[in-house]
Image: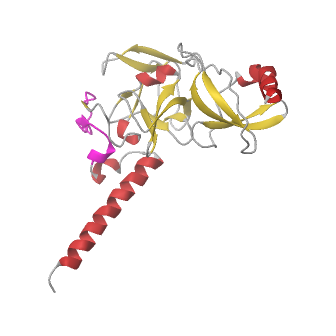
Amino acid sequence: MREVAASLDREESNLRGPAPPCNLPHNSYRQPCGGIEYFCQITDYASPSDTGIRVSVDRDSAAVSDSVALPRATPPHLAVRASPRRQHGLVCLIDVPAGTCVTNFTGHALGRTPTWRSVQVDIDSHVELLPQALRYTNHCCRPNGFFDTHTQRLIAVEPISEGDEVTVFYPATEWRMVAPFSCRCEHDTCIGWVEGAAALPETVLRHYRLNPHIERLRAAVRGLEADDVARLADSRPR
């Protein structure tokens, strides 16, 4: 354990690099440390000031753990500004083509208990986003962004111009929201009341890119509905 901790101390500067690659499970990445590749799992903030996060280090599934601070500052091309949708919004300071990554993200795990500002990343898992500026990303029924919770990337689904507010479709990540609200986007496709994907019909959801956990929940609901129809058919007199 002491050797691992010492190695982490020596390599701390290497950890202060770009956001983790996106081909690993949520909240995790691989990090070279002292010539050895460790599997790192994000567990908590490193400080109340939100200047970093803690990682638990596990080599070859062994019970080896330690923690170091990783800064997660707001990327220089993003800023929080006044927004017509709500008091504040996330604004992009550069042009971003459609289909490209606006920024990577991670999150402070909340488990099964969501909050009004959390993002659902799996069927029973919610996080508060890091960098903290991403928590100001507003909803829009015609979004230009998408939180891909599998790759941990904020993706531009439409071209984003310098000065544009970055918006996402909340039901793309949220099944049931703890703080529903009335949408103000005023688009022709506006859904009106935003309370999560569970409240929206298939005719609406099929027009949006959704995260895998939302798709799985949709499939589960469709399966239950099919079972109900089958049970009703079996109960009819013959």
The reply, left or right, for residue 120 in relation to residue 185 is right
The residue that appears at 50% across and 39% down in the rendered structure is 148
Q: Between residues 189 and 179, which one lies in front from this camera angle? A: 179
The reply, left or right, for residue 57 in relation to residue 44 is right
Quadrant containing the N terminus is: top right
- Magenta residues (range): 182-200
**Coloring scheme used:** secondary structure
Q: Is residue 176 above or below residue 225?
A: above
Q: Is residue 85 above or below residue 220?
A: above
Pinpoint residue 163: horizontal percent, then vertical percent.
45, 18
Pinpoint residue 237: horizontal percent, then vertical percent.
14, 83
**Farthest residue, direction bottom:** 238
Q: Is residue 86 magenta?
A: no
Pinpoint residue 109: horizontal percent, then vertical percent.
51, 32
The residue that appears at 31% across and 62% down in the rendered structure is 224
Quarter-of-image position of residue 113: top left
Q: How many numbered discs sit on the rendered protein? A: 0
Residue 164 visible to the viewer? no
Quadrant containing the C terminus is: bottom left
Quarter-of-image position of residue 115: top left
Pinpoint residue 67: horizontal percent, then vertical percent.
68, 26
The residue that appears at 54% across and 17% down in the rendered structure is 50
What kind of secondary structure does the magenta stretch mostly adopt? loop
Q: Is residue 194 magenta?
A: yes
Residue 168 visible to the viewer? yes
Quarter-of-image position of residue 102: top right
Q: Between residues 105 and 117, which one lies in front from this camera angle? A: 117
